[in-house]
Amino acid sequence: MGATYVRGRECAVAASNIRDPELEAVRQECQRLVRKISWVSAGAAALPVPLFDIAVDVGILIKLVPEINRRFGLEPEHIQAMEEETRLRVWKRRAERGSELIGMVVTRTLIQRSLQTMGTRVVARQVTKFIPLGGQIVSATLGYWVMRKLAYRHVDDCFEVASVASERYPREQAAR
């Protein structure tokens, strides 16, 4: 597998070729990206337009999730190109983590299912945005938090799966 470049520097290679420091660097870079993009979600949540923030969140996640997968080398075509034993370990670890977004073509349905896991917070965000000023601040805070939590979970899932694929961590840790 060849390397992928973003802004002129190497961000990710196929997961089976990533060394531990590289994998950690990809994780930190993805977390920075998530924090930056979460502010967009917070801005959309502050606007008192019903369901606008959810539409924005779905749009963000449809672009963000494949980018995170790409940076970790966990795109569907990368996983299919892995040796059979490695590919089976990746799919097993993916199933253990419960992630539906690793190595899959991301659809609106998958994203909406992920957002539903944060249902109470999403509903609270919708309700609070209509309380003048203070509600918009609370809604924006919840918007940032929900987006960051969902995306961080995906980054952590990708990190764990990529760790298993690269066999850099002992099997006992990978089985956690």
Image (cartoon, helix red, strand yellow):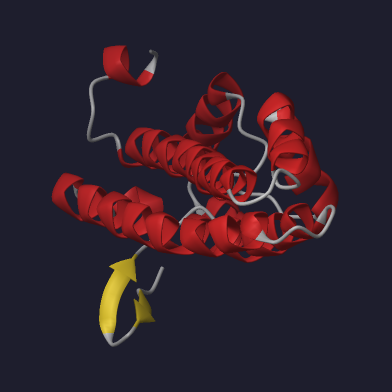
Q: Is residue 156 left or right of residue 113?
A: left
Q: Position of residue 175 (x, y in %)?
A: 39, 14
* Residue 139, picture quadrant: top right
- Extreme-front residue of the structure: 132
* Residue 110, picture quadrant: top right
Q: Nearer the viewer, residue 165 or 176?
A: 176
- Extreme-left residue of the structure: 21
- Extreme-bottom residue of the structure: 8
Q: Answer whether residue 85 is visible to the viewer in this image.
A: yes
Residue at image point 81% right, 60% down: 49
Q: Answer whether residue 72 is visible to the viewer in this image.
A: no
* Residue 118, picture quadrant: top right
Q: Position of residue 150 (x, y in %)?
A: 55, 40
Residue at image point 62% right, 50% down: 136
Q: Quadrant of the C terminus?
A: top left
Residue at image point 29% right, 34% down: 167
Q: Is residue 127 left or right of residue 169?
A: right
Q: Is residue 74 left or right of residue 59?
A: left
Q: Position of residue 88 (x, y in %)?
A: 55, 32
Q: Position of residue 103 (x, y in %)?
A: 61, 49
Q: Quadrant of the N terminus?
A: bottom left
Above-or-below relation of 36 to 15: below
Q: Nearer the viewer, residue 113 or 105?
A: 113
Above-or-below relation of 71 to 163: below
Above-or-below relation of 123 to 47: above
> How many labels were placed on the picture?
0
